[in-house]
Image (tube, rainbow, N blue to C red):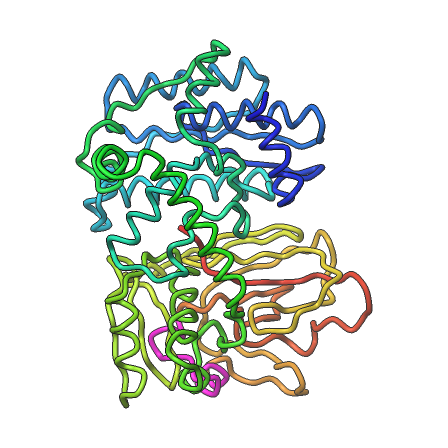
Amino acid sequence: MELYKGIQRKNLRENLIEKNDRIVVGFSGGPDSVFLTEMLLKLREEIEFEIILVHINHLLRGEASDGDEKFSLEYGKKKGLKVFSRKIDITTLGKKEGLTLEEAGREARYNLFNEIFIQEKANKIALAHNKDDQLETFMFRLVRGAGLEGLEGIVSKRDRYIRPISEIYKKDIVNYLDSNGIEYRIDKTNFENEFTRNSIRLDLIPFIEKRYNPKFKDRLYALIEEIREVNRALNINLEDYLVNGKLSIEKLQKLDRYLLRKVLLQYLYSYDIEVTRKKISGIEEILNKGGSKDISLNGNYILRKDYNYLSIIENRERFEGIEEKVLKIPGQIKFGDYIIEAIESDKIVYNKNNFYTNLKIGDELLVRSKKDGDRIVPMGMKNYKKIKDILINEKVPKEERENIPIVIFKNEIIWIAGVKGSENYKNLQKGNCIKLSIRRSIS
């Protein structure tokens, strides 16, 4: 009962779960995800919200993986919860995408979570990271050379993601389930030190506890909390340094080195890219050099210096032949590596990633790639201009121009997503209006 009270207090403090939420829950069938779901079910007795379970069968452990899937489906049925399950061969996915098994598994999970998130019109995704996961992430990033920003562990709330049990140790989770006779599945690969994080959990932390300090975990978590306090005190707003989603080199050059590194770190984290001191140092080196330059960030992304801006772009040609998508208001779609969203909003924050329009609930939009001859009446103007010319004037690098989503209503282009909106469709009224927004997909 004390564990549940701790989750209640955390929820009141951080507003993780609120009335009428529709929450997608990552459910593996293991102790963490079962405990998370049990706590959410208890919380649902006090707060009205919906729970949707999502399970992924990684096809790594044969009958054991199939057993996890069967358990997850039966658990959901017993609890009266909707469950989505999918088999994904992450071994093949990893080879195809040039990823490790850990990376491929993570990509597959987050892709599926976000797909169901959109399909079920959810507003949050709950993940079952516990306190031990936070400590392992800290150690993992420390070993790889992260700065203060990266040593915060795993935050409880970021964008749509919430982690309600992130302050509870694994041993307490297992003890609760065992004491209450609640079944769960065990993934035996968690006890193999083949993966770096497993090795940290199984070898490094127990060695430090045994050899140096039996309360090492508590001391380490206290340090993580102190680092979070320091980061909050030195908080910077990434948006202040962005122009059309790119970092302005002119603005960066005015910062002292520590704040510069914080901005670079936040920018990389916004693309979910692991950060090391070596990566940050490499970016710093090219800031004062002329011309264009590319830096490989990982298997998926490169950082490009071009037109006095830094931008992160795909390392693969994923936009070629992308099919048109229909977006009904309200709603969202995934277009290439972007999420385009249309919602009703009463708050107006002007930047190029948002366009406030005179559209209505129920209107349908078409989203496609740029075509030759495309034109728009840019905001503040009366006549049509070629989109090609606008992209050149906005200094969008040539190789990215074909990737920009073009949003159309009744055969008229109303938004060059993330670049320029239409004068004919801009919002003129006060109060609620339709907001179009673009952001990078997490997948």
| Residue 361 falls left or right of residue 246 | right
Most distant residue in the bottom direction: 290
Most distant residue in the front direction: 212
| Residue 123 falls left or right of residue 200 | right
Q: Could you tell me what secondary structure mostly forms the magenta stretch?
A: helix
The residue drawn where x is 58% and y is 32% is 6
Q: Quadrant of residue 124?
A: top right
Q: Is residue 306 magenta?
A: no
Of residue 81 and residue 153, the one placed in the foreground of this image is 153
The residue drawn where x is 59% and y is 30% is 51
The residue drawn where x is 49% and y is 16% is 75
Quick one: quadrant of the N terminus?
top right
Q: Position of residue 39 (x, y in %)?
A: 57, 26
Q: Over which residues does the magenta segment extend? A: 389-402
As displayed, is residue 237 above or below residue 202?
below
Q: Position of residue 432 (x, y in %)?
A: 78, 61
The residue drawn where x is 19% and y is 45% is 95
Most distant residue in the right direction: 430
Q: Quadrant of residue 281?
A: bottom left
As displayed, is residue 270 above or below residue 286?
above
Q: Position of residue 242 (x, y in %)?
A: 49, 75
| Residue 390 falls left or right of residue 376 | left
Circle count: 0
